[in-house]
Amino acid sequence: MNTHATKVTYNWSPQGYIDLVERTSNPGLKEYEKKELEYIITKIPLLNRTVIDVGAGYGRVLPHLAPLTKDIVAVEIDSNMFGELKRRTIKYPNVTTIQGDANYLSQLLDGVELMEPIILSLQNSLGTWVGDAKKAIAEMKKIAQEAHGEIIISLHRQKALKTYGVGMFKSVEALVGKIDLQRTDFGKGIFRSKTGYLSKWWNDSEIETMIKQLNGKTVNKVENSNFVILHIKYQKENE
């Protein structure tokens, strides 16, 4: 996705993200982050497996998952976020960090041992993707399919943008900028800020298309009025 004529002036500050997102006082965003982690920890066997956190940011989920699994591979493209991510992984010897474009995930992971991988794309990362989100989905599918793994993708829902979304973005305004009402399209689920930030929120048809593209076994589809969590699994032929 691109921002067309709007000059991009926002900056991913790890500390700003921690203060405004991880420590949010917004009840909807707080519930979203809680439900993501609860699902991963309670519904997926993590022991002796590899977690691949795609779009890991500064490492928000590392403290929760690192003690529970064999190893974690955290992939992040943004230099500012990656610097904080590396700093945080010092205390977790089972975490490997990779700076790179997850549209080429299979190349980034070439030579990395993957134990029944669980690929995570959390907090509507696909809605703010740099480049073609469909290519990222294809890469995640390729890795999970070859290694008989699982994919967890969480997305914000288009119908919640005008209600929950506007309030949520206002709560993180210092990070992403003020809403650009002229260029925000609630019907298409497109939020734009005056600093060039863009976030895509997904309608039911788009979510179903994504499930079809992933083409695995849909283990679960956790639906909330504001978000959805997709759980896709790729089984061995005899399972």
Image: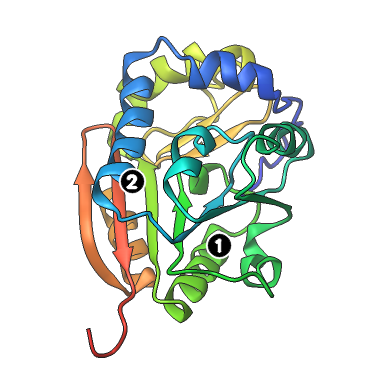
Circles 1 and 2 in contact, beta carbons < 8 Å: no
In the image, what residue type sits under mark 1? Ala
Instruction: Tell me residue 67's x, y (percent).
Output: 47, 41
The kind of residue on which mark 2 rests is Ile
Label 1, label 2: how many angstroms apart (C-alpha)?
Answer: 21 Å
> In the rendering, at what x and y percent does residue 59 appear?
59, 36
| Residue at horizontal 31 percent and vertical 64 percent from the top | 232
Check disc 1 and report the residue beneath it: 136
Q: Residue 65 carries which label?
A: none
Quarter of the image where the C terminus is located = bottom left
For the image, the number of numbered tags is 2
Instruction: Residue 220: give x, y in percent of width and height.
Output: 21, 56
Q: Is residue 135 above or below residue 52?
A: below
Place of residue 26 in the rendered image (x, y in percent of width and height, measured from the top left): 38, 13
Relative vertical location of residue 9 with respect to residue 123 in this rendering, above or below = above
Q: Where is mark 2, residue-wise?
A: 40
Residue drawn 54% across the image and 32% down it: 60
Crowding around mark 1 (Cα neighbors within 10 Å: few <14, some 14 to 19, many 20+) is many
Q: Mark 1: which secondary structure?
A: helix
